[in-house]
Every structure is written in structure tokens, then in C-alpha cells.
């Protein structure tokens, strides 16, 4: 009740603070500590690559609460609100793509978090992080699909208007085959994403557990769609040629933005 109403309307933004310098793909390799006190937790540590970290009203922070059990069974999730004493924004990342996205380091120095800001139960942090990623990956697939479709639409329009050797380049077989392959891949990504969404709709409302099929499709659609986005945008730049490489045209941005979809929410190799 404290957070969800304004998050659901978009009035407030949230952030997901999981990754640390030592971790990356090994999401359980984090050392940010939260020591339990009489009236809450004292958090110390750093998180990196936090999307919206500098502008979010609330951040879900994954912390070790029981060092003896380690991150797998001894981690928990705390909701830390903007302006909390001991929370500060560190380095702002300068990225090749998604430049309008605020990506920062968060620093916790004796940051006091009330006990009522514990998300779920102590010791459930790793399970919650995995479930979060399983639901986030289809969103990344949708992002990748939109990038690919946007690049493809622009590319087709350009190929119909660009005259080379007296005819639009879309009539040249080499370009036509390339565009056809791009269409096939984009539509295949769309159908895999839709299939994934239909499966996730069957989750129980309390979302206590995802089935192996739901986890599998979540990863498959993200991996495939992001690979498609990268391939389609690179080919789109190639079709448009020198203009595609220039910032006056939109394709170079599409290509730069596509790359991150192969990396975040779990690299495609993971």
C-alpha cells in the first residue's frame, strides 16, 4: 500500500539493485550487508548498473542478512526509499546506447532501513531475484522486438525510395533477400514473445512459483529477440549504407540500443 499505488500509475519510479562489481552474471556473488538492529537494518555496500537508480523513489536492494548461509540462502530484499540517510548516488555510467536511461552506482554507508521495509521474508532474496528476472526477461524481449521492428520499417521505406542503377534498391535481389530474412526473424521473435506471455498469464496470482516451462520460455524469448534485434539493426544500417551510419538517420541509434538487450537481465550466454 505504501509503494504500489504510485508505482502502478507511473507517478513514482522504482529501481532494482542487484549487481555488484564482483558478480555480474553470477547474481548470487554479492556482499552488500544488512545487519539487523533493534529497529531495522543497517546496510553497507555498493551496487552498480542500477537502472533508474538516481531518480527512483524506491529501490529494491538485495543484501546478505545471514553471512553464514551465504547469498543463496542468507540474502534478503529491502525497499530503500529516496532520500534515506546513508544512501547516495555514485558513478553515472556513460553508455553507447539507451542513453536516456539513468544507469548509476548506489552507495550504502550505514544506511538505516526500517524492518517493515523487508520485502517478503528473510532468506528469500535469491529466490525473489530469480523470479524478478524471469518476469523481466519478456519485457526485454519486447524492447528488442520494438527496436528490430522500428529498424525494419525504416529500412523498407528507405529501400522503396532509394534509386540505384535506375530502380529502387528493394528490387535488387541482394537487398530483397536481406529484407525478407529480416522480416522472418522479426516475426519469429514476435510469436515467441506472444507465446511466452500467454504462458506467464497462467501463473497463480500469488506467483509463489514459476513452472520450468515458464522459466524456459522467459529465457528463450529474451535470448532470441535480442539476437534478432542486433542482427536486424546491423543489416538495416548496411542496407541504408553510409547514411545509416550517420546520426542524422535513426538506424545507428537502433543498432546501439539493440546491444544492451543481449546483456542485461542475464547475458544471452547465461
Image (cartoon, helix red, strand yellow):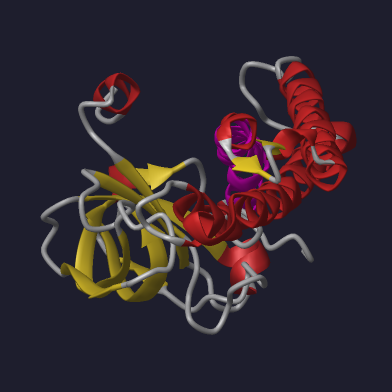
- Residue 123 seen by the camera: no
User: Mainly helix, strand or loop, the magenta region?
Assistant: helix
- Tell whether 149 sits left or right of 6: right
Q: Quadrant of residue 146?
A: top right
Q: Quadrant of the C terminus?
A: bottom right
Q: Quadrant of the N terminus?
A: top left
Q: Does residue 151 sit above or below 256 in this rendering?
A: above
Is residue 134 found inside the magenta-colored segment of the image? yes
Looking at this view, is 59 or 111 the one in front?
59
Q: Quadrant of residue 255?
A: bottom right
Looking at this view, is 206 or 242 the one in front?
242
- Tell whether 223 sits left or right of 110: right
Q: Does residue 117 sit above or below 256 in this rendering?
A: above
Q: Does residue 97 sit above or below 191 in this rendering?
A: below
Residue at x-position 24% and y-position 28%? 2
Residue at x-position 26% and y-position 72%? 108
Q: Measuring from the top left, give residue 248's x and y in whole percent.
A: 35, 52
Q: Which residues are magenta?
A: 127-156
Amino acid at each position: 500500500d505504501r509503494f504500489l499505488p504510485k508505482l502502478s500509475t507511473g507517478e513514482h519510479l522504482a529501481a532494482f539493485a542487484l549487481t555488484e562489481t564482483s558478480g555480474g552474471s553470477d547474481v548470487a556473488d554479492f556482499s552488500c550487508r544488512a545487519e539487523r538492529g533493534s529497529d531495522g537494518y543497517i546496510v553497507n555496500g555498493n551496487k552498480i548498473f542500477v537502472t533508474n537508480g538516481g531518480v527512483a523513489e524506491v529501490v529494491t536492494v538485495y543484501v546478505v542478512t545471514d553471512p553464514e548461509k551465504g547469498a543463496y540462502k542468507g540474502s534478503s530484499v529491502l525497499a530503500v526509499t529516496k532520500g534515506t540517510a546513508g544512501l547516495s548516488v555514485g558513478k553515472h555510467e556513460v553508455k553507447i546506447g539507451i542513453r536516456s536511461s539513468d544507469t548509476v552506482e548506489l552507495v550504502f554507508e550505514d544506511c538505516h532501513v526500517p524492518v517493515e521495509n523487508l520485502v517478503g521474508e528473510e532468506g528469500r532474496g535469491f529466490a525473489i531475484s530469480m523470479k524478478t528476472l524471469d518476469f523481466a526477461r519478456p519485457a526485454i524481449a519486447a524492447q528488442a522486438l520494438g527496436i528490430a521492428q522500428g529498424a525494419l520499417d525504416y529500412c523498407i521505406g528507405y529501400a522503396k525510395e532509394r534509386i540505384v542503377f535506375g530502380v529502387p534498391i528493394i528490387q535488387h535481389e541482394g537487398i530483397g533477400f536481406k529484407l525478407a530474412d529480416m522480416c522472418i526473424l522479426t516475426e519469429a521473435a514476435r510469436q515467441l514473445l506472444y507465446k511466452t506471455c500467454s504462458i506467464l498469464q497462467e501463473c497463480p496470482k500469488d506467483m509463489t512459483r514459476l513452472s520450468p516451462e515458464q522459466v524456459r520460455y522467459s529465457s528463450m524469448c529474451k535470448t532470441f529477440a535480442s539476437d534478432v534485434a542486433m542482427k536486424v539493426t546491423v543489416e538495416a544500417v548496411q542496407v541504408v549504407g553510409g547514411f545509416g551510419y550517420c546520426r542524422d538517420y535513426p538506424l545507428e541509434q537502433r543498432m546501439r540500443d539493440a546491444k544492451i538487450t543481449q546483456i542485461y537481465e542475464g547475458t544471452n550466454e547465461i
